[in-house]
Image (tube, grey):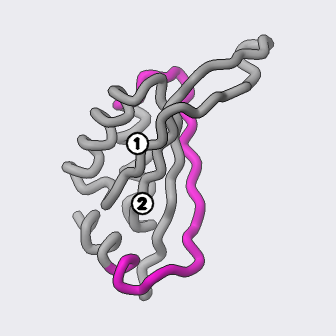
Amino acid sequence: MSQEILLALSTFPDAETARKISNQLVTEKFAACANILPGVESVYRWKEKIETGNETLVFFKLSEDRQAAFQERLRLLHPYEVPEIIFVSVANGLPDYLRWVAESCAS
């Protein structure tokens, strides 16, 4: 497989927001798939204060050539001032699945 696949992680304030944005990104072919994991507890520093909160984590699967467009679109849709958008390269996986990811978010 010549196309590199990425896993993108992002947290959202609630499951409803995560579902709405995930559906839009998959529908618009920015990502092939989104896995929504509700009930993540986050501890973080924001504006010189330690914050805690319940969030929803989403794993997005996309092809590397969609990375910049995905990031731009997610940033636009996301309700946070500075959203978590982290990309991790997928080093290996079932070739048929990786091919499906690449084909599913081809523009």
- Say above or below: 15 vs 3: above
Tell me which segment is drawn in magenta: 77-99
Residue 93 in the magenta stretch? The answer is yes
Q: Residue at x 45, y 66 (%)?
A: 64
Where residue 54 sits, quadrant-wise, is top right
Q: Quadrant of the C terminus?
A: bottom left
Instruction: Sort mark 1 into few (<14), some (14-19) or many (20+) by Cα contacts within 10 Å.
Output: few
- The residue at the point 33 percent across, 73 percent down is 102
- Location of residue 43 with respect to 47 vertically, above or below: below
For badge 2, the amino acid type reads: Lys
Horizontal side of residue 61 vs 84, given as left or right: left
Amino acid tagged 1: Glu
How crowded pointer 2 is (Cα within 10 Å; few <14, some 14-19, many 20+) is rated as many
Q: Which residue is mark 1?
A: 72
Asked whether residue 80 is drawn in magenta, I would say: yes
The total of numbered circles placed on residues is: 2
Q: Is residue 88 above or below residue 82?
A: below
**Where is residue 69 shown, x and y percent of the image?**
37, 51
Circle 2 or circle 1, nearest the eye: 2
| Circle 1 SS class | helix
Which residue matches tag 2? 61
Q: Does 81 sit left or right of 102 as displayed? A: right
- How far is mark 2 from mark 1, CA to CA? 16 Å
Q: Which quadrant holds the N terminus?
A: bottom left
The x and y percentages for residue 2 are: 43, 86
